[in-house]
Image (spheres, grey):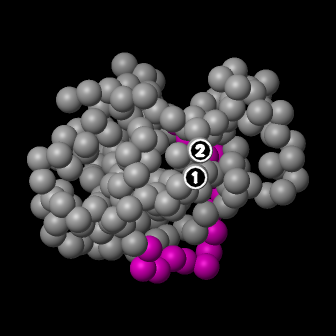
Amino acid sequence: MAVRKILTIADPRLYQVSEPVTKFDRKLRDLARDLFDSMYAAGGVGLAAVQIGVLKRIMVIDLLKEGFYKAVFVNPVLIEKSQELQQGEEGCLSVPGLSLPLARPKWVKVAYQDLMGKEHTIEAEMLMARALLHEMDHLDGKVFVDQLEPDLRLSVEEDIALIKKGAEPRHYKVPPYRRKAS
């Protein structure tokens, strides 16, 4: 369909809570295609609609190459999460060039709807759990750099300020799971 511009952390829309999807129609399917196209063009593995300026609770993830899932998640809701945490590098298409350690639950259970409105649940672990939580955070107006440990957040403030100005951060780094942009 179309590759859309991905908003960066300088854009206040990223910090707004997305509205539930109520119409399961062609427009929603077109939006899902645009999300995949935009994500692939940027080399990502997940993208939430808010990241392209659409404040609707829809997100896409493609981790097939990593042995997980490719799917569209509409109105996702976290049902359960493990107390056990996983440590890992996390990056974001809206925070280009930064990849930083962030602890997330090792396992999650998420309820969601597909593009036809049918309800599903998914249990996911490791990278898939991280991706689900990351994209769901976007739907709630949260960006991963705002969840970093305080000392780490302080140490990358200059990089975050550079990204907000449209510049490359001093410590440019891309997460290991990021795909090469086509």
Q: Is 151 on the left or on the right of 37, as rendered?
A: right
CA neighbours of label 1 inside 10 A, class few (<14), some (14 to 19), many (20+): some
Callouts 2 and 1 close, C-beta under 8 Å:
yes
Q: What's drawn in magenta, residue-wise?
A: 78-93
Whether residue 61 is visible to the viewer of this picture, yes or no, is no
Tell me which secondary structure the magenta stretch mostly adopts.
strand
Location of the N terminus by quadrant is top left
Q: Position of residue 95 (x, y in %)?
A: 61, 37
| 88 relative position to 62: left or right | right
Can you give x and y, in whole percent of width and height, for residue 79 in the image? 42, 79
| Residue corresponding to mark 2 | 12
Instruction: Give the secondary structure at mark 1.
Output: helix
Separation of residues labelled 2 and 1 (CA atoms): 6 Å
Number of numbered labels in the structure image: 2
Task: Give the vertical position of 123 relative to 43 (above or below).
Answer: below
Residue to which mark 1 is pinned: 15
Secondary structure type for disc 2: helix
The answer to whether 124 is drawn above or below residue 130 in the figure is below
For the residue pair 88 and 72, the one nearer the viewer reads as 72
**Kind of residue at badge 1:** Tyr
Q: Quadrant of the C terminus?
A: top left
In front of the other: 50 or 38: 50
Q: Report the disc number at residue 126.
A: none
60 magenta-colored: no
- x%, y% of residue 159? 77, 32
Tell me if residue 80 is in the magenta stretch.
yes
Q: Position of residue 125 (x, y in %)?
A: 46, 64
Circle 2: residue type: Pro
Residue at point 86% right, 47% down? 154
